[in-house]
Amino acid sequence: MNTPSPTLLAQAGRVLAQLKARYPRMGLHLNARNPWELMIATILAAQCTDARVNQITPELFSRWPDAAALAAANQDEVEAVIRPTGFFRNKAKNIIGAGKAVTERFGGVMPHTLAELITIPGVARKTANCVLWGGFGLNEGIAVDTHVKRIAYRLGLTRETDPVTVERDLMRLFPQEEWGGVNHRMVWFGRDVCDARKPQCDACPMTEFCPRLEPPKAARASRGRGGAG
């Protein structure tokens, strides 16, 4: 793996400083009381807003409070509850499958490694990284959703558009202890300032050093919060 140039490392340092200045305190975007709830909420958040997910998870977790309960749930009933999140049939299948995986393969205990998490239905690297950091305080990677991908490209931190490759590039630029915070702060920044269609450049603290590069249109075709988990 090539070492980033001093210029690129300096750019990453400026970006991180501005993100931390704007968002000094960290918190989760999704309401969850434990790693299990965070994983389910993150699966539901694919192609859906966090606000909408937060509206439906209280009923979901009230009716099926843990992995064993969800594993035994009727899919039609689960679909009815999560319908507002979109793609509800596939999501219901995945979260019921997640309940079965955690119950049968992990003894009802949420796994806390990337390798284990990505074996669970509906969980890919992005969701696994969110759960590891938000649920366990572990930095094994950087969750790359549409906000992170867009901002990293605009700021010149990557020339890639594939989320896994973008994650690799960002992991080389930021200290490991900052990885989870980089994701969450970039998500907030993407919502507040660096909008996909109408970025508020006049109000952006990074204007002086932002090259505002735009990824190829084909790579920007996917809309929503971030696609597959």
Image: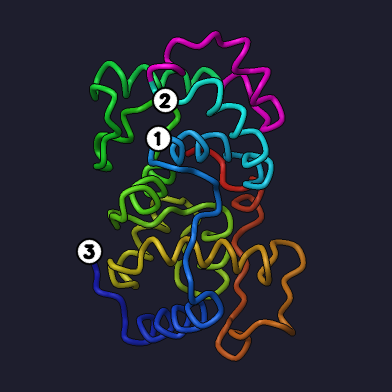
Query: Which residues are the magenta region?
Result: 68-91
Marks 2 & 3, CB-CB < 8 Å contact: no
Residue drawn 46% across and 60% down? Answer: 160
Q: Residue furthest front?
A: 62
Establish if 221 lies above or below 41.
Answer: below
Magenta run includes residue 154: no
Residue that label 2 marks: 66
Instruction: Give the distance between the C-alpha atoms of the residues marked 2 and 3, in whole angstroms.
Output: 41 Å
Which of the 4 image quadrants contains residue 190? bottom right
Marks 2 & 1, CB-CB < 8 Å contact: yes
Residue 224 image offset from top left, x and y in percent: 66, 46
Magenta stretch, main secondary structure class: helix
Say what secondary structure mark 1 lies in.
helix
**Label 1 packing within 10 angstroms: few (<14), some (14-19), many (20+):** many
Using the rendered image of the protein, determine whether residue 224 is visible from the camera's viewpoint.
no
Residue 202 image offset from top left, x and y in percent: 74, 84
Instruction: Give the distance between the C-alpha atoms of the residues marked 2 and 1, in whole angstroms.
Output: 7 Å
Residue 25 image offset from top left, x and y in percent: 48, 71
Say what secondary structure mark 3 lies in.
loop
Establish if 83 lies above or below 15.
Answer: above
Residue that label 1 marks: 36
